[in-house]
Amino acid sequence: RQEGGREMAAWARAVRGLLLDVSGVLYDSGGDGGVPIAGSERAVRRIKASGLKLRFCTNETQATREKFVKKLQGMGFDISVAEVTAPAPAACRILKERSLRPHLLVHNDLVPEFAEIDKANPNCVVIGDAAENFTYANLNEAFRVLIGMEKPVLISLGRGRYYKETDGLKLDVGAYMKALEYACDVQAEVVGKPAKAFFESALAEMGVPPQEAIMIGDDIVNDVGGAQRCGMRALQVRTGKYR
Amino acid sequence: RQEGGREMAAWARAVRGLLLDVSGVLYDSGGDGGVPIAGSERAVRRIKASGLKLRFCTNETQATREKFVKKLQGMGFDISVAEVTAPAPAACRILKERSLRPHLLVHNDLVPEFAEIDKANPNCVVIGDAAENFTYANLNEAFRVLIGMEKPVLISLGRGRYYKETDGLKLDVGAYMKALEYACDVQAEVVGKPAKAFFESALAEMGVPPQEAIMIGDDIVNDVGGAQRCGMRALQVRTGKYR
């Protein structure tokens, strides 16, 4: 709004790639699988028809990308696994690079993403949106693994505060990350939005530089703030967790 | 150790009151009720026989003071309810003063301490060491109550990171407090150690000024740091959570 119409138009012409958040933008998630947000399925089709490059950039870690994509396809969305940038594969790259063997505190449905990772005798903890797996016993266990390390390493698949499901707001992984950070006096390494490396990897996958891309999401910190720190523009939709 | 022997002796003669932490100092707690730490029962008897004033200063919120004291008496300790300073009664005073109606996220056995408090239509959340009540559902519920307030009020019965039970280390209320603080972008008001008001209330109950009292505990932040900020001296024992 601070820009003149001409400048705005010139910028819009320069846009070659779109990064789309999924939950809260394309659909509202929920225990029942979720419901699409009106008009979003058509929007995805129109973006693709326009020739813009498109990448789905999600912090969802309650399922493998395969399962996640299947759910969205079932709602009518034109989406494939190869178009999705998600935290678990990014974490696996880090684990391999640094020879880290994780103790996993994640959703059961995410575990297959770590199938090829050595998990014996853990030397780090990976936390995701474990949902029902965030039990008192599981949190104590992850804490004991961490506090038992000489130098605790905590990797968090996102740092979201909360999200909206069809039956109400839920605490996101960031809240549990903070609990473990405080208990062990460590700082988690965040993989996923708003980490710069995560956006950069999505841009590289599209082959589009940041100044020619826009991020569209419902989270002011993880989507908008994270993208802007990478030199991208960002738009906040008023669906999902927007309050 | 920086003081000369004479100065030390003069100080020791000035001491008129002792504040004793309980868990990790007198006994190690656990699902089985816990086990006394060797020599501690005799130490309490000797302190009382010496004429020193004594106050049990605990952050334990897994039981009413009545139940807590009964457990310790069962282990052979000379202790009564009137000698115990604990967070729940301190929280009740605050709730009444400020007309706050709490949503409780506490241990079932602590609930009777709030019997006389109006809990209908809550306008604050009180969190204690809820242990098995720290479920995913209960945490989401407390979060939703908080985030639904115009100005969220979170009262935490302590800010401990973790404690030791006979079957291992457990996350303490502080970790869950941090999770809710982060999710709602609020700062909790801490009742209990290391809050200054809590120590001051224990000193007032003994009728001893801070410079004539010593705090003895196993927690460097909650016991030692908290007491020192009140102008007391403090000793850290090497039992309990000491690592």
Image (cartoon, coloured by chain):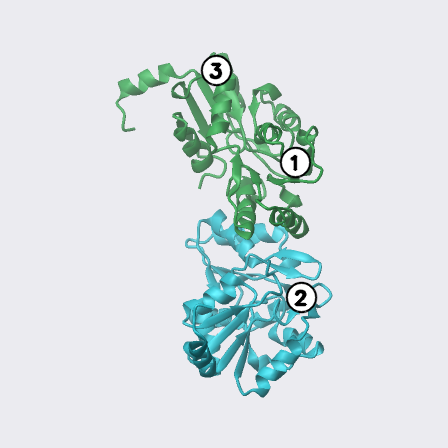
Chain colours: A green, B cyan
Determine crowd level at label 1: few under 14, some 14-19, many 20+ residues with C-alpha closer than 10 A: some
Q: Position of residue B219 (x, y in %)?
A: 54, 63
Per the model, the C-alpha gap separating discs 2 and 3 is 58 Å
- Look at mark 2 in the image and give the residue it sits on: B29
Dots 3 and 1: beta carbons under 8 Å? no
* Pointer 2 chain: B
Dots 2 and 3: beta carbons under 8 Å? no
Q: Position of residue A211 (x, y in %)?
A: 38, 20
Identify the mark nearer the N-term, 3 or 1: 1
Residue A67 appears anywhere in the view? yes
* Pointer 1 chain: A
B243 in relation to A206, above or below: below
Farthest residue in the right direction?
B32
At a point 41% along the width and 21% down the height, the residue shown is A210
Quadrant in which the N terminus of chain A is drawn: top left
Looking at this view, is A203 or B237 the one in front? B237
Determine crowd level at label 2: few under 14, some 14-19, many 20+ residues with C-alpha closer than 10 A: some
Q: Amino acid at mark 1?
A: Arg
Per the model, the C-alpha gap separating discs 2 and 1 is 32 Å
- Which numbered disc, 2 or 3, marks the residue closer to the eye? 2
Q: Secondary structure at mark 3?
A: loop
Mark linked to residue A207: 3
- Look at mark 1 in the image and give the residue it sits on: A101
